[in-house]
Amino acid sequence: MKISERAEYASKPQPLTCGPDDLVFDTVKRMADKNYGSIIAIDKSNHIMGMMTERDILKRLIAEGRDPKKTKVADIMTTSVRTAKADDDLNDWLRIMSNERFRRLPIVDNDNKLLSIMTQGDFVSYTWPELMQQATTMAKATFGETLSLPRILGGILAYTLLLVLVVGLIR
């Protein structure tokens, strides 16, 4: 599935943006007003310069004792921002975000101009129903159409009892 095929992609509000020279204090107020955990710093052509997240604010502003009324966003933002295209595979990006431990993914057009931002939460809302459907399909293929909740619970109970007996015999 492509990122652009997700319902969340189409319904996303415009990403919250700022300039890299904006003051952190003013920018954080805007983030708080909108209840956003990040803001994208862009240039005049809508190209991404960096991203300031709650983590950047904690680590590079508060922990370093900087004054938010004198510190520019550029001074604390993350500049190595991963970006995706709307036609990229959603599962690939979910895996990358999980492995590389980042939660926000700006989506850019072919000219690298900011279009939207997707979060891990947007992707997870896709994966849970998909995973449940896949598990159901696999279980039916393995056990047939007679699979039912009592049989599943009975199987788990039988496995647990067998495991307890084996562990008891080993001791």
Image (cartoon, rainbow, N blue to C red):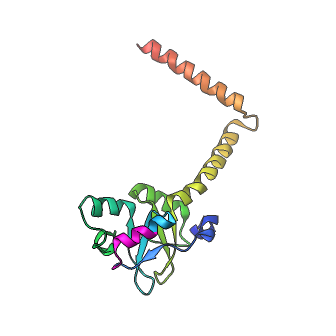
Q: Is residue 168 above or below residue 81?
A: above
Question: Is residue 150 shown left or right of residue 163?
Answer: right
Q: Check if residue 96 falls in the magenta segment.
A: no
Nearest the camera: 63 or 11?
A: 63
Q: Position of residue 139 (x, y in %)?
A: 66, 40
Q: Quadrant of the C terminus?
A: top left
Q: Quadrant of the N terminus?
A: bottom right
Question: Is residue 19 shown left or right of residue 130?
Answer: left
Residue 26: image quadrant is: bottom left
Question: Is residue 6 shown left or right of residue 113?
Answer: right
Q: Is residue 81 visible?
A: no
Q: Is residue 117 visible?
A: yes
Q: Position of residue 17 (x, y in %)?
A: 45, 75
Q: Residue at x 48, y 73 (%)?
A: 16
**Which residues are the magenta region?**
21-30
**Direction right: furthest residue:** 146
Q: Residue at x 46, y 12 (%)?
A: 169
Nearest the camera: 15 or 64?
A: 64
Residue 97: image quadrant is: bottom left
Q: Residue at x 46, y 17 (%)?
A: 167
Q: Position of residue 124 (x, y in %)?
A: 55, 55
Q: Residue at x 69, y 36 (%)?
A: 143
Nearest the camera: 144 or 136?
A: 136
Q: Position of residue 158 (x, y in %)?
A: 61, 22
Q: Is residue 137 above or below residue 125?
A: above
